[in-house]
């Protein structure tokens, strides 16, 4: 004989020992979970910063001269978290568009040539600290191949 959890009330013993019948449906209320998901979604939508152009982690430097951003154009190189993928190249400043090192319409060389025709002779190369230096050399080599274009590599002021 089964022993009831509550010795005071023998009527509850029948409820505790009752087996589930085939017709009984288990009901789970998903409303609280949906409320939490909607609140988290709203929180992350409000707090996420989608401006990638200002989030480049450039190395610091002790010496250097500032380049004018009004007469310069920008090529940004972002590292890829996957170790087997090449870094991403973005052409332009705040509204950067994806580019590559090729000679096509999205190539760095064509971009620099177009900006040179507009009077922007200087190119500022911004790159994440994690980008392999060999890839930065490839980017600067392409920029140097455009006659009349000069480049600088962006760095942060050293914190003292």
Image: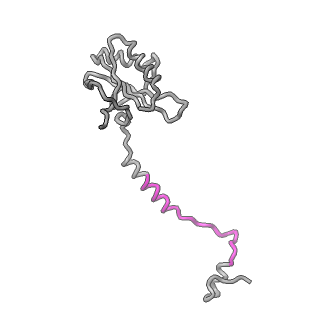
Tell me residue 119's x, y (percent): 27, 16
- At horizontal 58% and vertical 66% (from top left) the residue drawn is 27
Residue 14 position, x and y percent, is 67, 82
- Can residue 97 be seen in this snapshot? no
Q: Residue at x 31, y 15 (%)?
A: 116
Task: Name the quadrant containing residue 106.
Answer: top left
Relative to 101, say whether 29 is above or below.
Answer: below
In the picture provided, is 17 more to the left or to the right than 86? right
| Residue 21 found in image quarter | bottom right
- Most foreground residue, 87 or 90: 87
Residue 67 placement (x, y as % from top left): 27, 24
In-image side of 76 versus 7 (left or right): left
Let me know if residue 38 is in the magenta part. Answer: yes
Which residue is located at x 34 percent, y 35 percent?
A: 54
The residue segment tinted magenta is 17-40
Q: Nearer the viewer, residue 70 or 126?
A: 126
């Amino acid at each position: 004989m089964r022993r009831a959890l509550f010795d005071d009330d023998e009527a509850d013993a029948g409820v505790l020992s009752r087996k589930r019948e085939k017709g009984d449906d288990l009901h789970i209320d998903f409303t609280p979970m949906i409320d939490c998901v909607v609140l988290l979604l709203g929180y992350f939508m409000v707090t996420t910063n989608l401006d990638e152009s200002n989030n480049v982690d450039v190395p610091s430097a002790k010496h250097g001269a500032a380049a004018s951003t009004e007469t310069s154009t920008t090529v940004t190189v972002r590292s890829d978290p996957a170790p087997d993928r090449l870094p991403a190249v973005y052409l332009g400043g705040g509204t950067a568009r994806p580019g590559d090192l090729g000679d096509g319409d999205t190539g760095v060389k064509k971009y620099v040539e177009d900006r040179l025709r507009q009077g922007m002779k200087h190119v500022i190369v911004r790159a994440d600290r994690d980008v392999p230096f060999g890839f930065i050399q490839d980017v600067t080599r392409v920029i140097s191949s455009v006659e009349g274009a000069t480049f600088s590599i962006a760095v942060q002021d050293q914190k003292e």
